[in-house]
Amino acid sequence: MELKNFLNEFEYDWAVFPAQQKKFPAKELQNKTVLVSGGHHGFARCLVYSLFAANDLHSLSMKIILVGRDSSAITGYFPQLLKRQDFQFFTFEQAGGSERLSADYFIYTGCCNKRLEQTPEFFIGEIDYAKKMLALAHHVNARRFILLSDYRRYGVLERGVVASEYEDGTVDFSRASAFECELVQTIESLCPIYAKQLGFSYVILRTGIALGACTGFDDSIITDLFKAVAKGEEYRLLSSKNKYSFVYISDILNAVFHAMAGLRENTLFNVVGKKSTVSIGMLIATLHDIYPDDTKVSLEYSEKDPCYGAAMNNQKIICCGCKPKISLEDAIQMLVESSRVRDGQFVFKDSYQGKLNIIQNILLGYLLDIDRICRKHNIRYFLAGGTLLGAVRHHGFIPWDDDADVMMLREDYDKFLRVAQSELPPNVTLHTADTDPLNYCIFTKLRIDNTMFATKYTSKFLDMHNGLFFDVLSHDNTANSKLGRKIHLQLTLLTRSLVFNKWHRRKIDNGHKFQSFAANILKAVLPLSFCEKMQFKCLKWFEHKKDAKYLYDGMGRNVYKGDFPKEWLSETVFWDFEGYRFPIPKEYDKYLRYLYGDYENMVIASSRKTSHSIIIMDLGEYAHFKRPQTKEQKAQLEQLDKNRLKADAAPLASAEKPAAADNPAAARPEGDSQANEKENVPDKRTGCAEQAAENVAPREAQDEEEAYQNRALDILTRAAQKNDKAEAAQKGISSAPDAI
C-alpha cells in the first residue's frame, strides 16, 4: 500500500522528506524496530507515516510499533495503512504486559508543541505518564530513547538573547503559561535520570515552534494567522520586539532519524528551521511579500511577550550533519496553500524576484532560434533533460524550471558548432572552451551579452562570460561490450573531475579514499590544459565506431546514469511545448525513465524550486521582456498548423517526400505509406500528432521555415539599430521599451 495513494501532496511531502536526504542512515536502520509513543496525536502520526516511507523507499524491513494511552490513539490514521505488515499497535497496558515486545529505538513525543491544561491534575498526570514511558523503554530493551521537547523549556529570555542548548531563561509565575514551562523542564530532567538508572542512552530534541501543512498542529500560536491569510480575512495579532524560532515538520522528522542513528548519545539538540528565527513583525512582513493582497493583519505591540517563545541556536545539530532544509518562507507558502481549496498541484510562487516567467520566455526564444538553425542546416536535435520532461509532462516548461537543454548526436553537435556563431544574432555568444579562455565547461552554452546569470561556481570567474544561458549537449558513442563501457565511463568521470576541480581550485572527493587520493595527485601534477585535452579525447573515444549500439551523456550530469541503447534516439516525433512543436525521441518514455525513474509524478512539494543556485542575476535591458506576436505572426502560425494537419491527414506520396537522410531534423522510421499514415495518428496521451517535415509540400515547407524565423523571439533577432523604427517594423520587431 503506497503512501501516495492515501496522503495528499503536503502530507506525502513531509512523510518522504527524511528518506530522500543524502545522509539518510539507511544501513543503520535496516531490520530495526522503532516504537513511537506520545500524547500529541499529530507528531505520532507524522512519525509513523515517515517510518512507512523510509521502509518503502529503502526496503529497510523496519518494524514500526505505535503505543497509545488507549485505542483512540489511532484515530485519524488511514485504516488501510494500519493493516501494513510492518505496523503494530498496542495500548500502554498491552505493551507493558507483553514479555515479547522489544524495540531498538523508543520515540516519545510527550508534550512537544502541545497546548497544555493549566491544572495540577494535568501536570501530575503528564509527569506520571512520562515516567511510565521511560520505564517502558527499559522494559522493551530499547538501546536509545528519543524525547521530543520544545521551546517552552527556555521560559523568558532577555531581549536579544539567542539561546544555546544549556542556557536558561526565567519563569514568569505571574502568567498562567508558566505552568507549561515548568512541565516541559520537568520531563526533560527525568530523561537523563532514568536513562542512567535503567541503562539506556537518550537524545533530547528541543524544537522551535512547530509548523506543518496538514499535520494537525492546531495549537501553534500562529496557526490561525495562516488560515486567515488563506481566506483573505482580517486578523489581529499581539507582538513584541522579541524573536521566535520556528521549524517545519520535515526538519523535525529528519532530526528524529538522525537521532536514531547519527547524533551523539546522551545529548541535547535544538531543532530550528532554515532562516526561521524572526520577530512577529518580520513574520508578517514575509507574509506581505508573498501574499500582498491577502495579508490583512493588524499588529498590537506589547512590552511583554504575548506568548512563550525563544530565539534558539541550532549550530550544534548542524555541526553533527543535520542541516535544516525548509526555510520559513517556504513553510509559510505550504501552510497557506494547504488551507486553500485548490485545483491542480502545489508550486512555489515565482522566484528570481518575480522574473522566472521572463527567463522562461527568453529560453523559449533560444529554443526557437536553435530550431531555425537546425532546420536550415539539416541538423538533428531533441529536447533534453528537464526541457524534455516538461514537454511530456506539462507541454511546456516545468513550472519551476530555470534552464533549458537540447541534445544532439556527436556528428550533429559538431555541425551545429560550425554554423551556429554565424547564424546566431549578434547579441548572442556561442560559449565554449574554445571561444572563452576562462571557460572550461565541457558542453556548449548560448549566452546573451550584457546580462548576468552567475551560478555559485561560475561567480568565481566574473571575467568569464556569465550571461543568461541555454545548454547544448552531445550524446557520444561508447563501447558495445559491458566492460568497455564501464572503463569508458570511469575515464570520463576521472577526466571531468580533474578539469572541474582544478578549475575551481578544490580537492576531489568522490567518496572513495584511495580514488580521491590518486585523483588529487594527478590534479596537482597535470596542467589544466592537458586535463582538458584528455577530457575531450575521452568523450570522443568511440566517435568513429560505425556499429556503436550504446550512447552516454558524457557532457551533462547524467554521466552517472551510465549508457543507454542508441536506438532510443534513432527516431523523432514532435511534441507540444509552450504552444510550439519541437522534436523529441520517439522512445521518450524509456529515455525519461532512464533519467528520472517514475517521471510522471512530480517531485515532492518542498522540492519544487529552481535548480540553479544563482548568486548574481542581472537581466539588464531584458528585465521586462515580453514575447511579441504581431497579427501577421499569429496568421502565419495558424496557417502553419493548418498545413501540418493536412499533412497528417494526407501524407504525400513517397516520390514527393525528401529522404529522411536529407532531413535529419525530422527523421522518420522507414516503411510503406500505410505505416506512415498509422504513425500520424495523434498520441492518445497528448493529443499531438507526429509532425515530420517531409510531409509538408514544397511551398508549405517554405512557409513553415518563414514562420519559424518570424516567430523567434525578438531578443534573439534584434534590429541592428534600436532607433530605426522603420527597419524594426519591417522585421516585425517592436522597439518599445517593454518588448525589447
Image: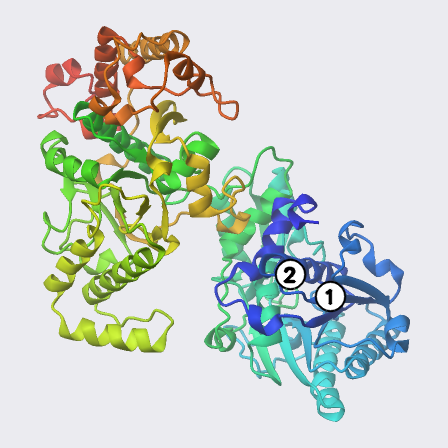
Residue matched to label 1: 64
Q: Earlier in the sequence, mark 2 or mark 1?
A: 2
- Mark 2 Cα shell of 10 Å, populated few (<14), some (14-19), many (≥20): many
Q: In the rendered view, does 167 fall on the left or right side of 531?
A: right
Choose between 271 and 436: the one closer to the eye.
Answer: 436
Going by the image, does 83 lie left or right of 414? right
- Circle 1 packing at 10 Å, graded few (<14), some (14-19), many (20+), is many
Along the line of sight, which residue is nearer the eye, 543 or 377?
543
Q: Residue at x 71, y 61 (%)?
A: 48
Return the x and y of residue 266 as percentages of the image width and height.
62, 85
Q: Which mark is residue 522?
A: none
Residue 246 pos. (x, y %): 57, 62
Disc 2 to disc 1, how far (Cα)?
A: 10 Å
Placement of the C terminus among the 4 image quadrants: top left
Q: Is residue 64 visible?
A: yes
Residue at position x 86%, y 73% in the image: 95
Tell me the residue at 52%/43% (across/down). Answer: 602
Please name the residue that numbered disc 2 is placed on. 55
Tell me the SS state at disc 2: helix
Q: Position of residue 336 (x, y in %)?
A: 59, 45
